[in-house]
Image: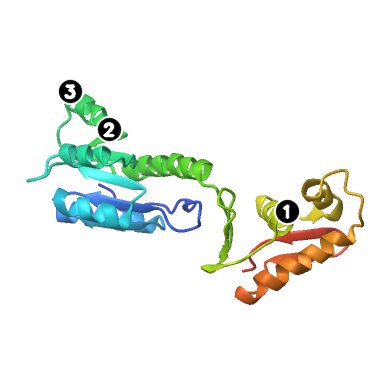
């Protein structure tokens, strides 16, 4: 097993936090090797040595990926996954096992596993498989997440809640529509005409100064909570982005 891995482009969850991975293997050194390799990916990785402890960590840690050894004393990988699935958790799972018969692979996939690698394995191959699983998981999370995020600002399109750095922000309906449009186009520079057409609709009969007025309203509510996020691009329009 080769531990010298190239650093891939870093994946993250839709909210920008690191991918969370849990390794469950009763071989302590193997679990630590995988944990360190996943940390090298920039992920938040943990390792435990038995299924019972894993159940508690899964509830508290809420991992995005599970790496499970099948043959463990006490609660083995198959039974652990059954309990996880029975609890409604569809976290992607990669099985690691010394059992390489076809029927064992079929049993692992049938139990709800997403991939299956036999020991001894190539570490780089395992990490590459986990990267692929993570990409698919992140894409699924992004599709199902109604929240838009820019830096420490979040906007929930279902509940209409807006928060910055954990502090609720009260917005009028039109302020919310404007902020949502900006966040949907993070880092894009939007012209006043584009904003009028999308937020006030094509039949708006007022003046374009309404855009400046509402941008000012948003800045007064958002900037005191963490600095400017909405920026003016002179002669063009506005953009929302977190500055380095």
Rate crowding at label 3 as few (under 14), some (14 to 19) or many (20 or more) other CA atoms within 10 Å: few
| Labelled pair 3, 2 in contact (Cβ < 8 Å) | no
Instruction: Give above or below for 80 relative to 210.
Output: above
Q: Secondary structure at mark 1?
A: loop
Residue 114 visible here: yes
> Where the C terminus falls, by quadrant?
bottom right
Q: Which residue is mark 2?
A: 112
Q: From mark 3 to mark 1, how far is it between C-alphas?
A: 52 Å
| Labelled pair 3, 1 in contact (Cβ < 8 Å) | no
Q: Is residue 139 left or right of residue 197?
A: left
Q: Is residue 225 left or right of residue 60?
A: right
Q: From mark 3 to mark 2, how far is it between C-alphas?
A: 15 Å
- Mark 1 / mark 2, whichever is N-terminal: 2
Name the residue: 20% across, 23% down. Answer: 102
Where residue 132 sits in the image (x, y, percent)? 42, 40
Q: Which residue is mark 1?
A: 188
In the displayed orientation, state which residue is furthest to the left. 73
Q: Which residue is mark 3?
A: 103
Rate crowding at label 2 as few (under 14), some (14 to 19) or many (20 or more) other CA atoms within 10 Å: some
In the displayed orientation, state which residue is furthest to the bottom. 224
Residue 4 visible here: no
Name the residue: 77% across, 55% down. Answer: 189
- Mark 3 / mark 2, whichever is N-terminal: 3
Name the residue: 47% across, 52% down. Answer: 13
């Amino acid at each position: 097993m080769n531990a010298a891995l190239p650093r891939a482009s870093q994946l993250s969850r839709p909210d920008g936090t690191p991918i969370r991975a849990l390794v469950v293997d009763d071989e302590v050194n193997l679990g630590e090797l995988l944990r360190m390799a996943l940390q090298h990916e920039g992920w938040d990785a943990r390792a435990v040595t038995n299924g019972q402890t894993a159940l508690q960590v899964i509830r508290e840690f809420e991992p995005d990926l599970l790496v499970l050894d099948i043959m463990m004393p006490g609660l083995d990988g198959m039974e652990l996954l059954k309990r996880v699935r029975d609890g409604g958790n569809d976290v992607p799972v990669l099985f690691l096992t010394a059992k390489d018969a076809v029927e064992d692979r079929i049993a692992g996939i049938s139990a709800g596993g997403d991939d299956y690698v036999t020991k001894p394995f190539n570490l780089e191959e395992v990490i590459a498989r986990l990267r692929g699983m993570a990409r698919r998981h992140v894409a699924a999370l992004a599709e199902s997440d109604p929240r838009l995020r820019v830096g420490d600002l979040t906007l929930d399109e279902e509940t209409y809640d807006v928060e910055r750095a954990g502090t609720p922000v009260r917005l009028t309906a039109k302020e919310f529509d404007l902020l949502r449009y900006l966040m949907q186009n993070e880092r894009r520079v939007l012209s006043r005409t584009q904003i009028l057409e999308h937020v006030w609709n094509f039949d708006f009969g007022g003046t374009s100064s309404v855009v400046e007025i509402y941008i000012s309203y948003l800045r007064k509510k958002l900037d005191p909570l963490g600095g400017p996020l909405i920026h003016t691009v002179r002669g063009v329009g506005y953009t929302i982005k977190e500055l380095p």
